[in-house]
Amino acid sequence: MPTPSVPDTLDSSIAVRQHAMRALFDQFDSLYEGAIAVDCQGRISWIDDKYMSMLGLRDPQQVLGRDIEQVIPNSLLREVIRTAQPILLDIMEFGQQSFVVTRLPLCDAGGAVVGAVGFVLYERLAHLKPLVAKFASLQQELDAARRGLAEHRRAKYTLEQFVGDAPATAEIKRQATRAAQRDVSVLLLGETGTGKEILANAIHAMSARAGAPFIGVNMAAVPESLLEAEFFGVAPGAYTGADKKAREGKFKLADGGTLFLDEIGDMPLPVQGKLLRVLQEQEIELLGSNKVVKIDVRVIAATSVDLPALVAQGRFRSDLYYRLNVLPIQLPPLRARLADLPALCDALLQEIFERNGMRRRAVTPAACTLLARYPWPGNVRELRNVLERACILSDRVRLDVDDFAAMLPADVGRAAPAVRPYAEALADFDRAIVQDALAAADGNVPAAAKLLGLSRAAMYKRVAALARRAPPA
């Protein structure tokens, strides 16, 4: 018997595979509503009569050899070929119809993907109403969660919420508007409670990145051992106990938007070096991975400490300081913009009313004057706490001096000393010392002049002036 040639063997193998495929389709004929197969290039190689009927086709030659997307635009068979992974259950839209489908890769004896096959399991979704309803409900919940997450990651404050129109406040708003127009690093400087977070949000909200995420990280609130994972994310299985899925860090979450680093002065030195590299290269590496991920993030940093002093002490990298300090904005303390105090009290009381459901309150002018005598080391944050405490303890709609006196240091409540014109105060002082000298010299003018170190002529002039100012007997 002659040995079969290679082409004969190949043809026989193809025939066996085609026979097996047909047998498989015949076996499942009663279990599905239609089937279609594509080759490794995503071209239709086979379609059964039931699928033809559903698609409104009469002749298979109309579709054989064509790209699957030309016939079924929403098909994912090419994705199955690319990933070599099945899509076991899906709802596919075709025109006005919806089909429940499953998609499987076709592999040769060596495991290489040679094509894919798709089955329509249900042509009419009426049989699956409970499943479809559950799917729709879950989809709505997922969409709502995504919207909520996106909303949470947007800027919470606008420039209007940086309350006040004092000259110092107006200058800060001008600088913030200018910063929003330039896609550079911003460094916000100022005491605690001056509104650095509000201003960072406002800059983002006015910038070209406003539609992208605004992600905030407080350096003081994250343990040093977790900072790298918090910033850069964690690769799957990077360490014992790590998630099997990758966990995105703050830089990746802020991709396309703004990352706000509050209390940047508390960042440990080792992390400072990695942050500098990210700012320079705009790329990160997940913890436990060597893969570089490109990002596009604008950084706004804030601190209430003296960064140059930390640089001089070797506790903060000078190169990182200069990188962050491209556009510095110094926020004034509340005591430097006391003209804003009435407006701030009004805005904060409105916020307390809306958040806590308390009665809407106001502050009397006398109480405002009292509050202005206090230096406010905690600034606007401390002012809010004092106002909220007064709202809790007082039943008055208009909060007065008595409602705040016990909350502030005792010397704040004391009346300020009276201030007189300089000429008037000087004349009273002159009269007093002349009278004291005359009394000590028993009325002898030359002797009194000698006591005061004055000439006789000068002393006689003062005595004459004193006589003129004396009230009539």
Image (spheres, rainbow, N blue to C red):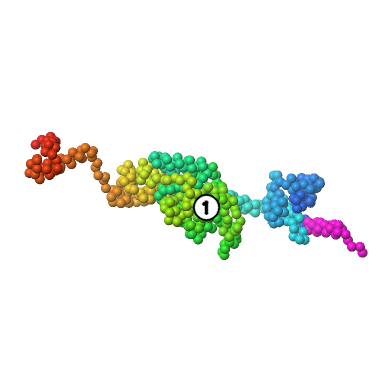
Report the predominant secondary structure element of the magenta stretch. Answer: helix
Q: Which residues are magenta?
A: 1-25
Q: Is residue 350 left or right of residue 372?
A: right
Q: Is residue 464 visible?
A: yes
Residue at position x 74%, y 48% from top? 68
Residue 7: in magenta span? yes
Residue at position x 14%, y 43% from top? 452
Q: Is residue 325 left or right of residue 437?
A: right
Q: Position of residue 265 (x, y in %)?
A: 45, 54
Give neighbour class at mark 1: few <14, some 14-19, many 20+ (Cα, 10 Å). some
Q: Position of residue 39 (x, y in %)?
A: 77, 52
Residue under label 1: 276
Residue at position x 28%, y 50% from top? 411
Task: Pick the quarter of the image with the N terminus.
Answer: bottom right
Q: Is residue 46 left or right of residue 310?
A: right
For residue 282, above or below residue 426: below
* Amino acid bearing label 1: Leu
Residue at position x 36%, y 43% from top? 338
Task: Pick the quarter of the image with the C terminus.
Answer: top left
Q: Could you say whether the residue bearing mark 1 is in a helix, strand or loop?
A: helix
Q: Position of residue 262 (x, y in %)?
A: 46, 51
For residue 127, above or below residue 473: below
Q: Nearer the viewer, residue 58 or 223?
A: 223
